[in-house]
Image: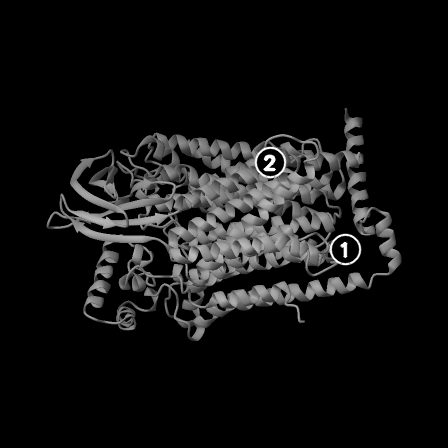
Amino acid sequence: MTRIPPGTALAILLLVGAAPPSDAKPRDAAHAITSQLICPCSCGEVLSGCTCETGKTMQGYVENAIKQGKGKDQIVGALVARYGEVIRGAPKPEGFNLVVWIAPFAATLAGFAIAFLVLRRWVKRRAALPSSLGTLAADRGGLSPGRTLEADLDGLRARAEAELRRMRE
Amino acid sequence: MSELGRLALLLGFICSVFAVGSIAWGLRTGYSGPLRSGRRAVWTVCGLALLAVILLERALLARDMSYRYVAEHTSKDLPLHYAFTSLWAGQEGSLLLWLLILSAYGSAFLFAYRKRLDPFYDAVAMVIAAVMIFFTGLLTFVSSPFRILATPPPDGMGLNPLLQDPGMMIHPPVLYTGYVGFVVPFAFAMAVLLLNRSGTRWIEEVRRWTLFCWGFLGVGILLGARWAYIELGWGGYWGWDPVENASLMPWLVGTGFLHSVMIEQRRGMLKTWNIALIALTFELSIFGTFLTRSGVLTSVHSFAESDIGPWFLSFILISGTAATALILYRKALLESENRMEAMISREGSFLFNNVLFVALTFATFLGTTFPVVSEAVTGTKISVSAPFFNRVNVPIALALLLLTGAGPVLSWKRATASVLKRNFILPMFMGTVAAVVALPFGADGVYTLVCIFGAAFVVTTIVMEFARGIQARRSGETAALPAQVVHLVKKNKRRYGGYIVHTGIVVLFVGVLGSSVFQKEAHAPLKTGDALRIGPYTLTLRGVTERQKQNATLTTAILGVERGSKFVGTEHASKALYSKSQQPMTEVALHSTPAEDLYMILGGVNEDGSASIQAYINPLVSLVWGGGLIMVLGTLIALSDRMRIRREERAGL
């Protein structure tokens, strides 16, 4: 049976999660639209929670447009035509904007791939270590020779410091 | 007095330059005299920074309008405590606070290691002093808080109303303590590379310093979220605002480091990676200041914008390039001493956890800076805000939540099939049960279910770890369970402190889930006697009053709140119009219970006399703050673990 490495499993999870959130249940149709827009004044708030005058006017506009039977695309399109792309809370995934949508997931997957390859190489190298080194490591309480040397260095430094302190006193 | 302040900063700059030069000379020649002089110079900078702060505070409290900084950020009607906190209301004052904290870290570092004669610690102090050159230089030559106006105005422009909140008295200093503190781990890392030092003792010291400032940064972020919740009046606490993101990024990378450093300590691996993470954390903390102060991006938290951005950018580029060059130059020093034994091991899970932390940081960085990049490339202005981050960052964060549970129950070196079975079956089962139980309560989205599964999974693994620990120590013990838990934590504070932090993270995730997915909102114009219903609550407008505060006019809607048929209290939702700025500010009315917050806002008073009332029910929001407190507790416990160092020192002797 083929085993799925943990990195791949997480990558699959990320890809599943990358789909638009189905649990982002709008409290009403107006909220579904205003929660995706930015207030066009300088406050920079998401429109659904904006309390400035411009924000309130815009919220009213969206509610009225819905009452008039306009659809989400129609309302957002009209607002974008008036205020520009800056009114969208998330850039439309097209053209250069695709970079910001794709790069985080591409980087995550690349990171997993690199981590996986590095791990595999380390595990293989470990397996290829001469048995004598393994024995030596075991003799030194499970530590590798390098690790022991490091510990020795630290110990020597601490000892030198203590002796210097004593001399000063 | 302004001359004295300027002189203090100039001397601070000179002392910083002297400290770097003197220590570098001492390190090169081996003479102890220059090293001692360099250390004293670092102490002196701290004293001079403190003097400068005292002088500026004196001017702020006296409302001495001849100081440009005082005239720009205070007014005569500003309450005294806000005049005091105006120190960090503007760019120059904030930079001065930075310098004070930075030099205090330098001095605290020298004090902590005063008995160590190893020149390595002088090299660390030299790197800290090099950073001090930048800040003292900025304050002396570019952005002095002691500039004097030729004609002082009769009154100042007043303090930004958003900053007139008790939360703002504590949030910036705590946040800065976290931000600035990352200079110490960075200095350690650079000193290791500069002196070509091997050994692992320094890494434990770095871990403790990192944990300290990581804790402060975390608390600072939470205080900022709490401030946004209370002061901004939009019903939430985290809006993926550029400045919020700027503080989150070093915290995320720092968290990654705190995990991967364990691999270096135990297995002598990931040395290059760890040093790179330390350097990145420091650079991101400087980048955070750059974002806040440069005015490159609009933010609700940005109160001081100017043209010092290029200076910060240059510093980031220079220090980043120097760190990268040193890492490459000392590549041989950073060779791993061991190799992995198996892919499925705690080391392996920490590696993937690091990938996720860095990926989350990258996503946040890209989203935060993309509007500027996109405009430069396409010429079109765009926004990258909460709707983007909720789609991109949330799945990565959920993957991290799952790893939070998986990592600690995997064995070091190699996790066998029996270990996996023993450690994972029950958490998986509990996670599934929790997700299924949550389904009828409206939790039917992918994110929601993964979050609930993950929360139950992590909590179960933590409980199992505690249970195993207690069982292992139980032989002959008859103490009550809480006493045994306390005993267990005391025996290995670092490990169990970490688990407590993980518990806090889970609680925080549940709080975020509850308050975002299950939030309810209602709004209506109300006349006196009218009622607004939201969930089980009924809000009845009792009346609208207007009164004068010290520096603002306060319009207040008095609301009677009933839950079902039970009267639960009278709440006051206000709008304050500040006299200086003529800026209307929301003052939220909050009815908090452990289960939910009823959050009420007065939008304004309409022409027909009705009051626009907006209300939210934010379920489980108390868990966001509670989770933060649990994380603080865990951090304190982990920080108090000194036994390991003592043991190591004894072994060394």
Query: At numbered mark 1, what does the secondary structure look like: helix, strand or loop?
Result: loop
Q: Quadrant of the N terminus of chain B?
A: top left
The amino acid at mark 1 is Asn
Confirm whether circles 1 and 2 share one chain.
yes
Find disc 2 in the rendering and name its residue.
Answer: B485
Query: Could you say which disc has been placed on residue B338 in the image?
Result: 1
Q: In this rendered view, identify the residue nearer to me: B429 or B537.
A: B429
Which chain does the numbered disc 2 sit on?
B
- Residue at 61% from the left image edge and 41% from the top image edge: B496
Q: CA separation, marks 1 and 2? A: 35 Å
Can residue B549 be seen from the camera position used here?
A: yes
Horizontal side of B1 relative to B563 (left or right) equals right
Can residue B179 be seen from the camera position used here?
A: no
Horizontal side of B574 relative to A114 (left or right) equals left
In the rendered view, tell whether residue B139 sits above or below residue B352. Answer: above
Q: Residues within 10 Å of mark 2 (few under 14, many from 20)?
A: some
- Give the total of numbered labels: 2
Q: In this rendered view, identify the residue nearer to me: B345 or B449.
A: B449
Query: At numbered mark 2, what does the secondary structure look like: helix, strand or loop?
Result: helix
N-terminal label among 1 and 2: 1
Which chain does the numbered disc 1 sit on?
B
Please identify the residue farthest to the left as the structure is shown.
Answer: B608
The amino acid at mark 2 is Val
Q: Quadrant of the C terminus of chain B?
A: top right
Q: In this rendered view, identify the residue nearer to me: B637 or B102.
A: B637
Expressed as whole percent of the image width and height from the top left, the position of residue B54 reads: 45, 31
